[in-house]
Image (tube, helix red, strand yellow):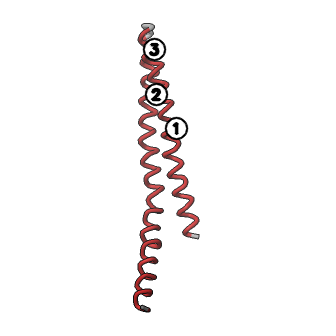
């Protein structure tokens, strides 16, 4: 039960990072490109709106990255607690038998 919960949490955390990398970064870059194009056309008020929206999305990107980090932490603890120590115990019993 704990193992499946840890796997689900880690998949959600990795999903957060993928969401940031593939969608949000492209969206922020797109908004900043629109803002720079509007500056070239001398439409400053609309350019400011696009850049404000890009800043808001960047702030959300940081929060989602923190959430993804905390969602992947249980997997790290699970690997250390159950993965590494089990192998160490098996290795000790193997060397005792020799």
Q: Earlier in the sequence, mark 3 or mark 2?
A: 2
Residue 15 % position (x, y): 54, 48
Q: Earlier in the sequence, mark 1 or mark 3?
A: 1
In the picture, residue 35 is in which quadrant? top left
Q: 57 and 78: which one is in front?
A: 78
Position of the N terminus, as image quadrant, is bottom right
Q: Residue at x 42, y 82 (%)?
A: 91
Total marks shown come to 3
Q: Secondary structure at mark 2?
A: helix
Do the residues under discs 1 and 2 have CB atoms within 8 angstroms?
no
Give the residue at the far front of this rendering.
Answer: 98
Give the residue number, with chain letter if any, for mark 3. 37
Residue 98 % position (x, y): 42, 91
The image shows residue 10, relative to residue 53, as above or below, that is below
Give the residue at the far top of this rendering.
Answer: 42
Residue 12 horizontal side relative to residue 77, left or right = right
Q: Secondary structure at mark 3?
A: helix
Tell me the distance, in whole angstroms, between the alpha carbons under discs 1 and 2: 11 Å
Give the residue number, with chain letter if any, for mark 2. 29
Q: Residue at x 44, y 62 (%)?
A: 76
In the picture, residue 42 is in which quadrant? top left
The image shows residue 71, relative to residue 31, as above or below, that is below
Residue 90 % position (x, y): 45, 82
Do the residues under discs 3 and 2 have CB atoms within 8 angstroms?
no
In the picture, residue 7 is in which quadrant? bottom right
Q: 79 and 67: which one is in front?
A: 79
Q: Badge 1, how many Cα within 10 Å: few under 14, some, many 20+?
A: few
The disc at residue 22 is 1
Tell me the distance, in whole angstroms, between the alpha carbons under discs 3 and 2: 12 Å
Q: Earlier in the sequence, mark 1 or mark 2?
A: 1
């Amino acid at each position: 039960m704990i193992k499946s919960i840890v796997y689900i949490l880690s998949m959600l955390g990795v999903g957060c990072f993928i969401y940031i990398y593939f969608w949000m970064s492209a969206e922020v870059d797109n908004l900043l490109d629109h803002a720079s194009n509007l500056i070239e056309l001398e439409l400053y008020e609309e350019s400011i709106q696009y850049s404000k929206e890009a800043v808001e999305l960047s702030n959300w990107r940081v929060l989602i990255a923190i959430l993804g980090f905390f969602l992947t932490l249980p997997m790290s603890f699970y690997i250390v607690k159950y993965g590494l120590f089990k192998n160490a115990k098996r290795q000790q019993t193997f060397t005792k038998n020799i």
